[in-house]
């Protein structure tokens, strides 16, 4: 009987282990930005401003950022940044670059009445996540404002996303090259619209409680059957 109890207890422990394992499930996931905005060479921002203007406006430079909470993810294989186009000005085509960000997410969000050229530079330099040509000459202005632009990020971005799994991850954006004089920008008036990070990857999920309950029930049933068998043999 002592051995029989050991079998039951062992089965229950194994069942508990199986019932509490996290199982990764492959899925396409769309994450809304938890924070977004800009840092400038000469203008101070406000906390409730989610505008992500990028470029030069009124003799001030603007680099933008997008922060995402990666807590639902364990690992990704592809990543695409999606942003609404809104307003552009200047040359008909601009070169837009995305970069890694060393500034922490909490510091990025504290841009109220602060000028910090180091953060501005951080958002437009470092490891490149992709370079894209973006047009600013609309055939239909109102339709173009609402257009969602998709930027497929490269392997460096994928590696950094995986390295930040379960944490916050930020992307910087800047116009590149000699993009002309005067007002040259993308994404102006981009308020009340969250950027999205669309990834193919694995989600960490906890199995339903029935998984654990079923394993324990099986252990108890095995104990009952063994005891009944012994009682029958004793008759």
Image (cartoon, rainbow, N blue to C red):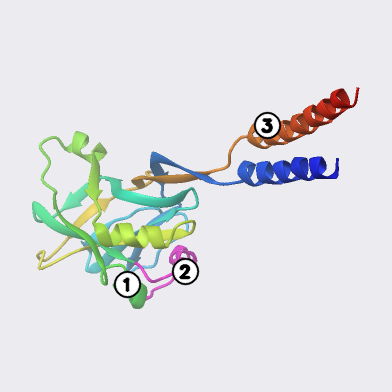
Magenta highlight on residue 213: no
Q: Earlier in the sequence, mark 2 or mark 3?
A: 2
Compared across the picture, whether 185 is left or right of 15 comes to left
Q: Quadrant of residue 172?
A: bottom left
x then y, percent, for residue 152: 23, 49
The front one of 31 and 75 is 75
What residue is disc 2 on?
107
Q: Mark 2–mark 3 contact, CB under 8 Å?
A: no
Using a 10 Å C-alpha cutoff, classify the residue at mark 3 as few (fewer than 14 neighbours), some (14 to 19) or many (20 or more): some
Residue 41 in view here: no
What residue is disc 1 on?
122
x then y, percent, for residue 32: 41, 45
Helix, strand, or loop for circle 1? helix
Q: What's the CA distance linking mark 2 and mark 3?
A: 47 Å
Give the residue drawn at x 22%, y 62%. 55
220 above or below 109? Answer: above
Compared across the picture, whether 65 is left or right of 187 comes to right
x then y, percent, for residue 29: 39, 41
Q: Quadrant of the C terminus?
A: top right
Helix, strand, or loop for circle 3? helix
Q: Mark 1–mark 3 contact, CB under 8 Å?
A: no
Q: Mark 2–mark 1 contact, CB under 8 Å?
A: no
The front one of 45 and 160 is 160
What residue is disc 3 on?
214
Q: What's the CA distance linking mark 1 and mark 3?
A: 53 Å
The front one of 26 and 137 is 26
What segment is highlighted magenta in the picture? Answer: 101-116
Compared across the picture, whether 8 is left or right of 173 comes to right
Of the two numbered discs 2 and 3 in the rendering, the one whose residue sits closer to the viewer: 3
């Amino acid at each position: 009987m002592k051995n029989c109890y050991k079998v039951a207890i062992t089965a229950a422990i194994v069942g508990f282990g199986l019932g509490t394992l996290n199982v990764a499930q492959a899925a396409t996931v769309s994450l809304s930005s938890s924070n977004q905005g800009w840092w400038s060479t000469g203008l101070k921002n406000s906390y409730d401003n989610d505008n992500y203007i990028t470029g030069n406006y009124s003799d001030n430079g603007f680099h933008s950022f997008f922060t995402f909470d990666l807590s639902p993810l364990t690992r990704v294989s592809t990543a695409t940044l999606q942003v609404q186009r809104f307003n552009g000005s200047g040359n008909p085509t601009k070169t837009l670059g995305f970069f890694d960000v060393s500034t922490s997410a909490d510091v990025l969000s504290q841009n109220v009445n602060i000028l910090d050229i180091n953060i501005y530079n951080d958002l437009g330099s470092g490891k490149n996540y992709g370079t894209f040509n973006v047009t600013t000459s609309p055939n239909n202005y109102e339709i173009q404002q609402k257009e969602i632009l998709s930027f497929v990020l490269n392997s460096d971005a994928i590696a950094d996303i995986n390295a930040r799994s379960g944490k916050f991850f930020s992307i910087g954006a800047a116009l590149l090259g000699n993009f002309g004089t005067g007002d040259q920008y993308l994404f102006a008036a981009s308020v009340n619209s969250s950027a999205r990070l669309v990834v193919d990857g694995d989600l960490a999920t906890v199995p339903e409680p029935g998984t654990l309950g079923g394993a324990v029930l099986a252990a108890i049933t095995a104990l009952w059957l063994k005891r009944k068998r012994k009682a029958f043999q004793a008759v």
